[in-house]
Amino acid sequence: MIKTEQKRFGNMPDGRVVMLYSFTNEQGLTVRMTNLGGIITSILVPDRTGRTDDIVLGFEKLESYIEPQPYFGAIVGRYANRIAAGKLIIAGKHYQLTLNHGRHHLHGGFQGFDKVLWQPTVFQDDERAVVQLDYISPEGEEGYPGTLTVRVTYTLTNTNHLIIRSTAWTDRTTVVNLSFHSYFNLAGPDRNTILDHYLQLEADHYLEIDADLIPGPQLCPVSGTPFDFRQPVLIGAHIGEEHPQLLRAGGYDHTFVLRTQAGPLQRAGRLSVPETGRSVDIYTTEPGLQLYTGNGLDGSLIGKKGTCYGRYAGLCLETQHFPNSPNNPQFPTTVLEPDAVFDSETRYVFQYNLP
């Protein structure tokens, strides 16, 4: 039986109560999340010696999540990643989204899904615990057409699967691209770097970015580049190379094109730290995975246990459709029609008894 707890995490500035939910399975893995932005605040995982560490970046108090911060652990949407100039053209009609990232639209705008208070419902049986989060995004929110009804469920199982499933419906043709934005550090907060992590991805191509981190339409082969993670590679092995794409982003901030495009759940890759025995395998129905190595962290954010989150303190593995897809018709579509359902699943499978 999975142990569950729920308690008040604090209050929004307008007085609304924010809840914190904690699930611990029979393997000793604990996941804590809040209904503000669907933020996962902690994932506590043992290592091969039995020591438990928190393997995601975040804060101890609600107030730090309400203040501007780089999407630690949150649901991002309506559209994860960037839309160039915030411009949408749907069925010949032009829409202007809010510009919250210089000249562009990022992660749903100023009031994206990471900043809203979701309606929670908790379920439990012998093998799993679930938090269901519901939110209705009104017509015109951040410039998007259509009223979008969204449901995201977080499920923790006794087999160390963290399953994130997102569904959405609209009353008017719109675009949807949801993702999960946790910053992982499998070594725990004492290490404060992910350069010693090994990453393997099921991707033969990646998307090059321009000076504003907007990808172009061409799929670029990873072979012979610092973007080749087809076999496990240390994150720190090539991140400091004088490659134009790495210099442009200050590290990795790129979409990898998964071999199996959107469809049945497929393996996307693995992140591991052999020293601790911890690893996480990623499975998804999405066509892409955004690798972001925390290039913008500068030590100004003080996290759990007083940790200063500096550059490369954590990395994101964001399963999603491609950035700027509405303006690249050759990319997999992110258009959602009123008679269709957006349905996406990603699961993280944690292990900590590797030989």
Image (cartoon, rainbow, N blue to C red):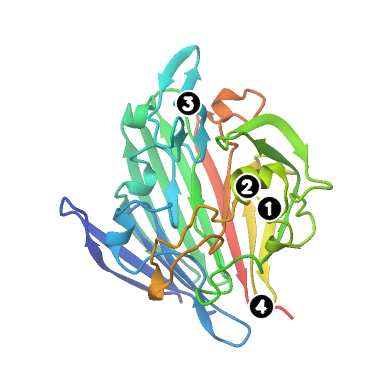
Task: Tell me, yes or no, whether the two marked residues, 4 and 2, touch with CB atoms within 8 Å.
Answer: no
Q: Secondary structure at mark 2?
A: strand
Q: Residue at x 50, y 11 (%)?
A: 92
* Image quadrant in which you'd find residue 11: bottom left
Task: Tell me, yes or no, whether the two marked residues, 2 and 1, touch with CB atoms within 8 Å.
Answer: yes
Closer to the N terminus: mark 2 or mark 1?
A: 1
Closer to the N terminus: mark 4 or mark 2?
A: 4
Instruction: Tell me the amino acid under the disc marked 1.
Output: Ala
Q: Which residue is mark 3?
A: 85
Q: Is residue 136 visible?
A: yes
Distance from disc 2 to disc 3, alpha carbons, whole Å, reads 22 Å
Dot in front, 1 or 4 = 4
Distance from disc 1 to disc 4, alpha carbons, whole Å, reads 20 Å
Instruction: Tell me the amino acid under the disc marked 3.
Output: Ala
Closer to the N terminus: mark 3 or mark 4?
A: 3
Q: Which residue is mark 2?
A: 289
Q: Which residue is mark 1?
A: 268
Q: Is residue 331 above or below residue 1?
A: above
Instruction: Tell me the amino acid under the disc marked 2.
Output: Leu
Closer to the N terminus: mark 3 or mark 1?
A: 3
Q: Secondary structure at mark 4?
A: loop
Dot in front, 2 or 3 = 3
Q: Is residue 337 visible?
A: no
